[in-house]
Image (cartoon, rainbow, N blue to C red):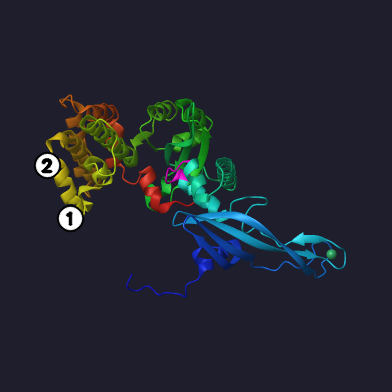
């Protein structure tokens, strides 16, 4: 940024405390936690009952979880003045509604961060709770309430929707299995290049029925106006869309297609690791230490990473990992191809080559090929309709209001 003008460093602005009506007056930094001492910016000394000016009587403190800065949990300890009216005796506290909902444990910035982390970045509630240093239940209740509040605040959110994305999120890992929530996003503006994705709704569960019921609950005119449904690999969503929106085109999201190939690569790496060493990977095992490098797009590798992969693949015992890695890289290359038609051709050739004649040892590639073959139409549809990428597009362009 050669033209950047630098302003004076300002912790209030940096931590976005100014948006909350707070002013930082102290910091206490620990490796695992940052605590910011804050005061409420606006005085609040006019009596709400009789209008007389009051004197500050004492202070109380309120603790709020803030957005984690650099993934370090950041807590706000807010000192709040209490006033007592000399005229009528009324007692009140400084107004903190800008900073948080009444009785909330999370600041408004923390809520926004948590909602985006879950819906856009696919973090689990558990991970969000950890980053905010609050309990699972606190994070869960706050995020659900905020999701509803954001949605209810925009009753016109269904107007003019032509492209939707549907996506499942793990809401909670339980001993009896994972709990899911289905998130429906409006991608119309993303596709037109005019704006960000918007959250349309959140529904409990991830069954075909959950999405089908939701679609069936919309007006016929709205359903007729939906042209494209972008989705992940879950076939239930595909069936629901086909039944309720028969004229809409279904598109499988690049993010999820790449994740299928990435998962195949991980499973193959772990299997080969187990075959060679008879145990799970450890820090100094070459397959284990290369696990992140394997997921990096070939064009983005540093010299050192290239050398590491060359050494890894020079070992004949790793040939199956190399073969699976090649499939993964070909997929990334197809999506990165600037010419959409060429990208489509590369993807079609890739799907064809993993759909039959794959050596029996490459079990992960065979499974991947079966899925890609079954969903080939939806995978390739992306190349005819750029801009429908559900998650990739929203990474950089998500807004809630
Ligand atoms: Zn008064």
Between 362 and 211, the one lying in front of the other is 362
- The number of discs equals 2
Q: Earlier in the sequence, mark 2 or mark 1?
A: 1
Q: Quadrant of ligand 1?
A: bottom right
Across and down, in percent, residue 276 comes to 20, 32
Between 208 and 54, the one lying in front of the other is 54
Q: In the image, 357: left or right of 367?
A: left
The vertical placement of 153 against 87, above or below, is above
Q: Residues within 10 Å of mark 2 (few under 14, many from 20)?
A: few
Across and down, in percent, residue 20 comes to 59, 61
What segment carries the magenta color? 118-124
Please, what is the dominant secondary structure of the magenta stretch? loop
Across and down, in percent, residue 401 comes to 52, 52
Q: Residues within 10 Å of mark 1 (few under 14, many from 20)?
A: few
Q: In the image, 150: left or right of 103?
A: left
Across and down, in percent, residue 155 comes to 58, 45
Residue 383 in sight in this render: yes
Query: Residue drawn at (45%, 75%), measured in percent from left and top?
Result: 7
Quadrant for the N terminus in the image: bottom left
Local secondary structure at mark 1: helix
The vertical placement of 181 against 149, above or below, is above
Q: Which mark is residue 303?
A: 1
Local secondary structure at mark 2: helix
Between 104 and 57, the one lying in front of the other is 57
- Residue of label 2: 314
Residue 400 in sight in this render: no
Q: Is mark 2 within 8 Å of ligand 1?
A: no
Gap in Å between the C-alphas at discs 2 and 1? 16 Å
């Amino acid at each position: 940024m050669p033209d950047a003008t630098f302003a004076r460093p300002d912790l209030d602005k940096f931590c976005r405390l100014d948006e909350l009506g707070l002013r930082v007056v102290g910091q206490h930094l620990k490796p695992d936690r940052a605590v910011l001492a804050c005061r409420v910016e606006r005085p609040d000394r006019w009596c709400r009952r009789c209008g007389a000016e009051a004197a500050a009587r004492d202070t109380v403190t309120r603790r709020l979880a803030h957005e984690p800065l650099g993934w370090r949990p950041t807590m706000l300890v807010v000192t709040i003045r209490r006033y007592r009216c000399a005229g009528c005796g009324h007692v009140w506290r400084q107004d903190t509604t800008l900073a948080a909902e009444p009785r909330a444990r999370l600041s408004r910035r923390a809520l926004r961060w948590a909602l985006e982390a879950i819906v856009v970045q696919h973090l689990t509630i558990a991970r969000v709770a950890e980053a905010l240093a609050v309990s699972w239940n606190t994070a869960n209740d706050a995020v659900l309430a905020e999701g509803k509040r954001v949605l209810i605040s925009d009753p016109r959110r269904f107007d003019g929707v032509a492209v939707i994305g549907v996506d499942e999120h793990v809401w909670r890992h339980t001993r009896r299995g994972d709990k899911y929530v289905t998130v429906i996003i409006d991608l119309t503006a993303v596709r037109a290049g005019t704006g960000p994705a918007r959250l349309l709704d959140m529904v409990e569960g991830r069954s075909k029925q959950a999405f089908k019921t939701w679609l069936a609950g919309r007006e016929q005119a709205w359903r007729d106006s939906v042209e494209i449904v972008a989705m992940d690999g879950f076939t239930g969503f595909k069936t629901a869309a086909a039944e309720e929106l028969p004229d809409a085109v279904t598109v499988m999201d690049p993010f999820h297609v790449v994740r299928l190939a990435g998962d195949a690569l991980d499973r193959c790496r772990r299997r080969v690791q187990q075959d060679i060493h008879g145990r799970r990977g450890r820090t100094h095992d070459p397959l284990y230490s290369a696990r992140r490098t394997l997921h990096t797009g070939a064009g983005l590798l540093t010299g050192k990473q290239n050398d590491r992969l060359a050494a890894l693949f020079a070992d004949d015992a790793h040939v199956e990992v190399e073969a699976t890695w090649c499939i993964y890289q070909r997929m990334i290359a197809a999506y990165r191809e600037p010419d959409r038609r060429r990208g489509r051709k590369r993807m079609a050739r890739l799907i064809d080559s993993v759909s039959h004649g794959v050596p029996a040892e490459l079990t992960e590639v065979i499974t991947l090929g079966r899925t890609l073959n079954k969903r080939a139409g939806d995978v390739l549809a992306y190349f005819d309709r750029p801009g429908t990428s559900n998650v990739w597009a929203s990474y950089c362009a998500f807004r809630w209001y």
